[in-house]
Image: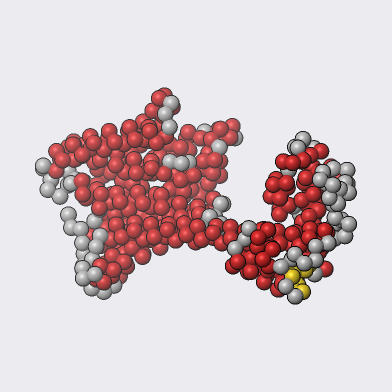
Amino acid sequence: MARYLVVAQWSWELDGWIVAAGILCAVASSLLGNFLVLRRMSMLGDAISHAVLPGLAAAFLVTASRATAPMFVGAVVVGVLTAFFSEWIRRVGRVDEGASMGVVFTSLFALGLVMIVRAADHVPDLDPGCVLYGAIELTPFDLVTVGEFEVPRAVLTLGVVAVINLAFVVLCFKELKISSFDPALSTASGFDSRLMHYSLMVLVAVTAVASFESVGNILVVAMFVVPPAAAWLFTERLAPMVALSSLFAAMSAVGGHLAAINVPGWFGFQSTTTASMMAVIAGGLLLIAILFAPRQGIVGKFFRQRWLAFGILADDVIALLYRWREKGATQVGNFANLKRTLFSGWFSLGATMAWLWLRGKIRSEGDAWRLTPQGVASAANLVRSHRLWEQYLVTRAGYESDRIHDKAERFEHFTDPSLRERLDQVTDAPSIDPHGAPIPEEGGGQ
């Protein structure tokens, strides 16, 4: 079976149908993949995709034909049996989901390879490779008549599957959501979580089988997992996750075909497998999500951690200047003393001091730094938080006074005025902390 189709320039008659098939497969798979990811069953799509091989081979050996209908039915039956057997082994054998899937799909996959090699002896173009890679490049040449139009068979099949999957997700959205997060609550609410589970598995099997001939195993497995995983990094709400995953899936299909016919030319080749390149683009989108997702991306987390550390260092600077001010130490507030006391680097401390100066919380007096009235108010609230926490840990939590400083040091940075007021109430409005230091009033002063 052909693997490549060299396309010199974009043609809607060829490339348009190829992209349409890719989009329909990707969106149909990602719609269901969201719930596989949420249920921690991401690899079930892969298991079903591999395990249907004996169904394909059995259908051919029984009918001696590669007609679409018997092949489709055989593969779907085995795909559904894979889901049932996996769940049965998990319950009866009391093993985890991954182990039960591993037992079922490896056994069926091995059996399928034996059977399909036997079938391939009679049909030259039936081989394991056609199931793995598909032939999406040949989509425009296998046409069926629909009314007055000729439509590629793969587009028609995948379009029907995509509509069914979309209808299932929309109509059963509430049931899918509850059964994915809390199966017991789902059953208690009046709809059996097992029914939703097996309904989902049937559609996963149908989607996987419908995608084999056109896009192959590689793309459908990728689309079950990668777009939903990327969408999950961008949002914690299910409805936006479903919408984003569908968008990412469509982008992967379009970008994958464009990359397949253009990128190889940069290296002196003509083209590459479109389905595989679509999966590569999906992986690239996932990588972008891992790096740049607002809340869970690596880059975002790094900058939030740096900003948090910067804010804590700024708090420590003004709190230290306030304590020195309490003691009447007027000559120690220079940069070197601050650096030595806070164990900070030159760059970090310099940037922090510049930021505090720009915000009007500190001012320079010769070689020393002093708090402005605004800085005194902010520092007093920090010190008040620290000493109230120390009082609380001793009087309410039962800690020894020599073991509370580090804990209060952490808590003080995240204590707002309402929490300070609550601490003041539960500790009976103390005026001094367990070490005998005065507790400032809110906003400054003693």
Is residue 128 toward the left or the right of residue 162 in the image?
left
- Answer yes or no: is residue 351 visible: yes
Residue at figure coordinates x 21%, y 64% from the top left: 5
Residue at figure coordinates x 39%, y 36% from the top left: 98
Residue 310, position in %: x, y?
A: 63, 62
Residue 25, position in %: x, y?
A: 36, 54
Specify the quadrant of the image occupied by residue 119: top left
In this picture, is 245 found above or below 103? Answer: below
Specify the quadrant of the image occupied by residue 326: bottom right
Specify the quadrant of the image occupied by residue 346: bottom right
In this picture, is 126 found above or below 79? Answer: below
Camera-nearest residue between 227 and 175 = 227
Residue 412, position in %: x, y?
A: 73, 52
Q: Quadrant of the C terminus?
A: bottom right
Residue at figure coordinates x 69%, y 50% from the top left: 410
Is residue 12 toward the left or the right of residue 183 in the image?
left
Residue 227, position in %: x, y?
A: 43, 54
